[in-house]
Image (cartoon, rainbow, N blue to C red):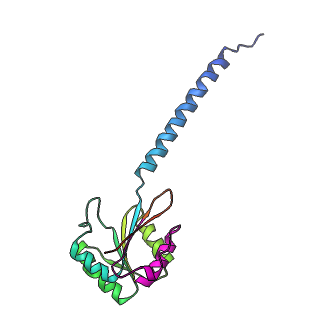
Amino acid sequence: MKKSYFGLRRRTIVAPLWLAGLAFVLVVGASTWLWNTADSTILVLVPSSVGAAHGAGPFGTGSGPDAIDAIYAADTAGARAAAAPLAARLGLPVEVAEGDAESLIADALGAHRGGRVVIVASVAAIPGLVEAVGDLPVPSVASLDPQTVLVIGVPRIGRPNLLRLQE
């Protein structure tokens, strides 16, 4: 009895089609996941710059794509007092950070991944916060003044970015 190789040939033709279809589905799924993941943004403010920002009104109203998700304040009375008017205006509670800079950044990024977070801290605490984010150039305390606002962009894939704004 002779073997029929006709059935085997049909299967070898269909196998690459299934593999191509599976690869297409995986590529579309991965690109959709990457497209829909948003970057996180951290705004680091010094207590005296919060008052200036509060009067100028640069922050979102609490809804929409430019809204602030959370406000964190360092565990000092000055930072909590400076963050209170901004939090009242946005209708958000002030979350007091009771740990070091690494735990504050981990809490902010963990709870609000893909969102916008404001951190009110003293000038002396800013280098520690920037260092805790990751691979960023850490500004020295001498190069910062009370009017400094740092915007840290933390993408899901890639390196974080730092933008320093001064009046």
Q: Say above or below: 136 vs 82.
A: above
Indicate whether residue 146 is drawn in magenta: yes
Instruction: Indicate whether 115 appears above or below 126.
Output: above
Q: Does 82 sit above or below residue 2?
A: below
**Could you tell me residue 30's position as x and y percent?**
49, 45
Q: Going 30% across and 77% down the picture, which residue do you hit? A: 93
Figure quadrant of the N terminus: top right
Q: Residue at x 35, y 89 (%)?
A: 77
Residue 11 % position (x, y) = 63, 22
Q: Is residue 59 left or right of residue 138?
A: left
**Is 2 or 134 nearer to us in this picture?**
134
Task: Give the residue at the far top of this rendering.
Answer: 1
Residue range highlighted in magenta = 123-152
Magenta stretch encompasses residue 164: no
Rendered image quadrant of residue 72: bottom left
Seen in the image, is 136 located left or right of residue 89? Answer: right
Classify the position of the C terminus by image quarter: bottom left
Quick check: 58 above or below 85? above
Q: How many marks?
A: 0
Residue 108 in the figure: left or right of residue 89: right
- Residue 136 drawn at (x, y percent): 50, 68
Residue at horizontal 28%, vertical 81%? 84
Q: Nearer the viewer, residue 37 or 148?
A: 148
User: Residue sitting at 26 percent across and 75 percent down?
Assistant: 53
Task: From the viewer's side, name the closer residue of 153 and 100.
Answer: 153
> Residue 164 at x, y = what percent?
39, 70
Q: Relative to the observer, which residue lies in front, 123 or 40?
A: 123
